Image (cartoon, coloured by chain):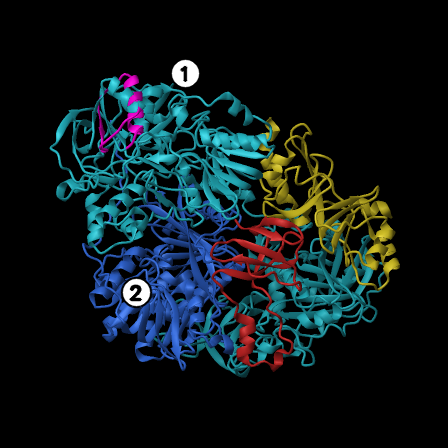
Amino acid sequence: MTTKRRHTAHLPEHPDFLWKNPSLKKSYDVIVIGAGGHGLATAYYLAKNFGITNVAVLEKGWLAGGNMGRNTTIIRSNYLWDESAGIYEKSLQLWEGLEEEVGYEMFFDQRGVMTLAHSVSDLRSKQRNFYANAVNKIDSQWLTPEEVKKIAPIVNISPGVRYPVLGATYQARGGIAKHDWVAWGYAKAASDLGVDLIQGCEVKKIKVENGKVIGVDTNQGFISANKVAMAAAGHTSVLAEMAGFRVPLQSRPLQALVSELLEQVLDTVIMSGAVHVYVSQAHKGELVMGAGTDAYNSYAQRGGFHVIEHQLASALELFPIFSRAHLLRTWGGIVDIAPDASPILGLTPVENLYINSGWGTGGFKATPGSGWAFADTIAHNRAHDLVKPYSLDRFVTGHLIDEHGAAGVAH
Amino acid sequence: MMDNLVQNRKSPLNNIELGNKNTIYLAEKPFATTLEIRVKPNSSTAKKIEKVLKIKFPDKVGQTFKSKDFTVLTLGPDWWMVVGANLNHERKIRAAIGNEFASIVDSSAQRTFVEVSGKYAQSVLEHGFENNLDPKVFKTGMCVQGVLSRSPVIIYHGPVGVYHLYVRASFAQHLWNFLSDAATEYLKK
Amino acid sequence: MLLINCPWCGSRDETEFHYGSQAHIGYPEKPDELTDTEWAEYIFYRENTKGWFAERWVHSVGCRRWFNIWRNTQTHEFGPSYKPFTKQPSRPK
Amino acid sequence: MSTVKFTFDGTDYRGNKGEPLSAALLRNGIKVFTESSYLLRPRGVVGLGYEEPCALVQIDSGSGEPMVPSTKIELVDGLVVRSLAGVGDLPISPDKARYDKIFKHVDVLVIGAGLSGIKAAAKAAHKGKSVIILDDQAQVGGYLNDKNEKINSKLLKNIKKNNVVYLQRTTAIGLYDQNYVVAVERRSDHLSSEIIPNFARMRTWHIRASEIVLATGGFQRVLVFPNNDRPGIMLSHAAATYLHKYRVGNFKSAVVVTVDDNGYQDAIRIHKSGTKVEAIVDIRAKVSGKLVKEASKLGIEIILNSTAVDTSADQTGAVASVFVAATKLNGEVIGNKREIKADLVAISGGWTPTVHLATYLNLKPVWDSKIAAFKMPKLPQGLSSTGIANGEFDKVENLPAKFFGIIPDGEDAKVSFIDLQRDANVRDLRRAVGAGLTSVEHIKRYTTIGTAHDQGKTSGTTTMGLLAQLIDKEPQEVGTLTFRPPYVGVPFSALAGRDLGILSDPIRTTPIHPSHLNANAPMEDVGQWKRPWYFPIEKENMHEAVLRECKAAREGVAVMDASTLGKIDIQGPDAAIFLDRVYTNMFSTLKVGSSRYGLMCGVDGMVFDDGVTTRISENRFLMTTTTGGAARVLDWLEEWLQTEWPDLKVFCTSVTEHWSTVAIVGPKSRNLLAKLAPKLDVLNEAFPFMENRFADVAGIPARIARISFSGELAYEINIEAWYGLHIWEEVMNKGREFKITAYGTETMHVLRAEKGFVIVGQETDGTQTPQDLGMDWIVSKKKDFIGKRSFSRSDTAREKRHQLVGVLPLNIQTLLPEGAYIVNEGSSNTSGKIPHIGYVTSSYHSDALGRTFALAMIADGRNKIGQFAEVPMGDKVAQVEIVDSVFFDKENTRRDG
């Protein structure tokens, strides 16, 4: 007697052809350093929106092999500050048409993102976030514990737990997407439009002559360029130093984990800053989980196991049904964090050298918006309105955009 | 007068006790008076204090000094906890050192003291304490400060296999819940 | 789980410490004589070195002392730790 | 060997206690175990350990567990399991089993108790070192044990010494920096199919070792050829062990397909178990030596230069015959097919050293052509490897061939499987290469090879080998996939351990907590503290209770437990200078016996804590901090003293929990204090505002401070924490005649808000300066202090910054939500974004004012006092007036009573 066994969703296949592996030309109009999500999106929008196709995206490792290769894939725009809501909402709007525009399956799924509140003061800061979204016309609902339970039945809303769920903000348009498919979608589209994707090409020096960038030295020789755009996330400080200026970034390990394939028990995204865990269940059935960064600077792409153990204890308090799930795989990435946990974008002290960095733990959701606004900034050689608030000089004026709450870093 | 003070005081764990010495024994031994002393090591002020209490400030963190009246735990390069010293010892010290630079603090109620002893004492502690408790390394007469199940503790290895845990009062109930639960398997043995 | 050598207590797990990022950043002598840019450098800018990095930790659950230590931020190898205001050992190879 | 009963897919079977479930199933004739997750092809048992890609089960008995390899379940009576097709179930019932953790430090940790591991452990034990040796098997011996060969007892005696701990059924899942290993021990699943109460089912070991020896053995590889996934096609070492050691029988005739001498050894074992070995098909051209002689002596035909090129199935889908043909080492089939009937096809595709743990430290495995596999990378000091893991394969007469199978095209490619659990095949690999992918990481993501439950233990190196051939590079140029912890799947519950429920995070309570519980006051979480929120009487809700508590504080006398405030004892000749540097206002001018409110900023000029500091004596201050800021402020003070101003003669000591603080508030508080401390002159002149007096309260020595957070006459009674509960009870007893009322955090918030006092963390979020909060009066112009320089930065000195003001809804019953945004009059209903001018930080009903009121931060707020604005509240809009931030007792007349 064979039982009715549970089978997983079979993902459709990637296309027969992805991208060309051209050899490096001697010069380009624009060089993008870093073929992560943001670098690839930038190249795509340069070509698509501005017809700038004489572009090379240089990647020292393998395409989309950094943070874009491993993250908890959460997408939302219900941030606190107007400036954040601006760029993340632009990104979400782009997400909503992206698969069609780029012509690539990405499993973009607006299944909603719920951010839980666990104490009176936590409730207060989430409520302020909710009202900020209302005036910024960002779709966001307030949920009582009972409403949380209705949307996600596996959440433990009992008042007897150590930090009970007292309420939550919920953005129905938020959700997830499959990070590799997003990256390959952008890469294929950019390659089809004539952009050169060069892997295994490491930038050694950013050449500057009387204050203006003229090109880059790489392990495959010197390449000249009118404009150079930095999109290297955790390695931004290393690049900035090559160009002779400094950025207030610290690179930290950020870990993510997955379980094995399990029956679907969670069809929305749940975040809890106070209890330090975010979780969603991917299309094939694996639980995808993350928490805060490890505590020190690191480029080693690994973190401590105690971070995983604490996160799983918190997860079992919130989701008792996960107790039998297995931890199958853990990763560590390198996220670049600014003092106010907001990105650093736009122009740099070096003419025609542009910076896209500081996305910290929230980079994936910003991929389309960041690429779109950064391409505009590069094309016009001035900061787009969405990018302007994130200039380097905000650290001199003191006009910071403090999104520590959003980054889940216990404030 | 004294009995009013003794009669009306309450300790965080109300003298709770559990288990027995041949498996695992846990017990609160409250109301140890304690002075926390911070002073420049080997300074003249330090020597005066040592004379008043007839003690020696060990100079290496983790070392202790024991006399009839006091147990001195070295918590930091200029930070000692003198268990057994009380307010009138503080008065004698202040009389001896006047305005010289030192910090004398009666912190008797800041922590309570839980004894963990018995055959499986080390194993029970190892369920929540990350530092090395191997008696070859954490010898008798040594103390170590760290975290036991998210609670800040000072562990003093008294006689062989007898551990004195100094835990901050507000963490005492949690520590007790953790230790008594960790002892589950060992109580049955 | 890093094992960090506290100059006073010896080697302990990283969970006993808090991180202080780049070492040897002194509080400016006369803050009011600094330009806003120089003041921003002090408040917000810290090295983010890939490789050997002289950084600060405090043994917050142990002796509660701040100290400096060399660490390779790429391999997590540690060099010597040293007390504040003492001669910095040279950068390990 | 006692027999036990177990249930598989609803049917009862018998098996031998302790043998792998997979062996019992094979003996019971279950060859077709399940179907594959995507292509629904029949699949059977392939391996013998964690490498098993297909025979996964859901355990329904005991705790229940999804996706467990049947090869790693020791048979126990009453076991109930179901076959799976790659997706597990999550039972809803709570798991009653216990899981715990332990932390150990040893000189030497040996991972793997095979022969090489035992040797390493014995050597270390002999030198008197403390040793832990762990292995995921139930007994020592590893492969020898599978071959029924024994380890010599002298060696074993060494690991029985008392300085050695031997952990069975324990798997090292992660190796971290500075030789830190996490291993999970399975302690009860083999003892009973039921949950054993009060006994940890699994224990997670955290081991720090000075030296680690990796004796982790290796995995046998599959070979790739069309229809290589049928039930009955197994790894040869597994097949030989099932037949020879576990005597599963049930296989009539076998063919061994090999690239190395192990194939011969396994063929001999299969033969000795009674199953006829039709042939050994060896890809190599020339072989010699003892094993080969012994095999042919047993009448086993040896076919060289050949490999399997196809198989056929019987009606159940299990393998019925294998087709062999002459094949070149590059996978090109040159001879014609010959069919050999066989219900067992045992594959010896070569052995891969288990290098995972070392690679978790980003060390790259190294290709060794002698063993045709990637072996352990060069290891750092303190880490070494031995045995198969180190590429030290048994002495072999003939080297293994670098051959991973044939790489067919077209239809055959679709049934030539590389990753059995993901149904990933040669066609997928060819497509990935064709799509322009060269990196093995891209290949993995494109084909999903190696992403399943077995994490590519049998398919990893095979993929590398085939890919290298397809893009004609050497294996070391292609490199390996990145291995990541954990080495095997570990239940979340084993990693959460006992950090759940009551033990999930400390619940910090004050000495007075028992009384709050008796009053059944609902609690509020403030950091890790539980603080009484309000004290309802009978059926009161919070609103009703708070109004009553506020009235008592304003008109009679009320009492609060303020013990959770941080308290720091600061002593030394330079204490006063030090406080001048950390607070925005002066403290060196404070008289002995007096107290002063102080504000603390970060270097960025933003407020991060506040509290009252009392000068106990010339060189001694007692600083209080917010409840949430206690640890942070002490660290902050220590950091400046140790790393910036080491020559300042100041020492700080936390006394947060040495003192309990009982605050009595209200016009009658003086009368109550007189009763409590008869010897104390309580008149205002004798005991003025912000002064301290020492006296016995209810017979207990106390320091009484005239500090008021409500604007009322108030006294904070500080006693040693041992007496906190006693004093609280005395205050309640003696207070009865004044109708004393206990109040909680909610009332405290209302009383201070009526006075316009800020709460750090509610009015502030780390982006407000003292000036923003209207506290210019507390910012000293004379001295420098931490943060002062930031006030002159352009944005910090900007005009239109958000400032603290009051907000009064025109409808006096409207309670504005805290966090609500404030917009200009008439702008609430614009369609696009509504420009906002500020947000509400605090909002309450006020008994004293007889209406609702709120505090808010509004851009250029102080210049807008008297103007009107709107607060959108979901579907309603509240009209409000911007007013001064002090609502009640503006002239501070009430504090002297």
* Residue D28 can be seen in this image: no
Q: Depth check: D513 or D230 in front?
A: D230
Chain B display color: yellow
Q: CA distance from mark 2 to mark 1?
A: 63 Å
Split into 4 quadrants, where in the image is the N terminus of chain A? top left
Label 1 SS = loop
Chain A display color: blue
Examine the rendered structure and indicate whether residue A90 appears above or below residue B67: below
Q: Chain of mark 1?
A: D
Chain C display color: red
| Residue D266 highlighted magenta (yes or no) | yes
Magenta residues (range)? D260-289
Residue C82 image position (x, y, % from top left): 63, 58
* Residue D158 can be seen in this image: yes
Give a yes or no on whether discs 2 and 1 share a subunit.
Answer: no
- Residue furthest to the left: D336
Total labels: the figure holds: 2
**Dot 1 amino acid type:** Met
Q: Which residue is mark 2?
A: A40
Residue A114 tag number = none
**Dot 2 amino acid type:** Leu
- The image quadrant of residue D225 is top left
Q: Which residue is mark 1?
A: D1
Q: Depth check: D430 or A97 in front?
A: D430
Chain D display color: cyan
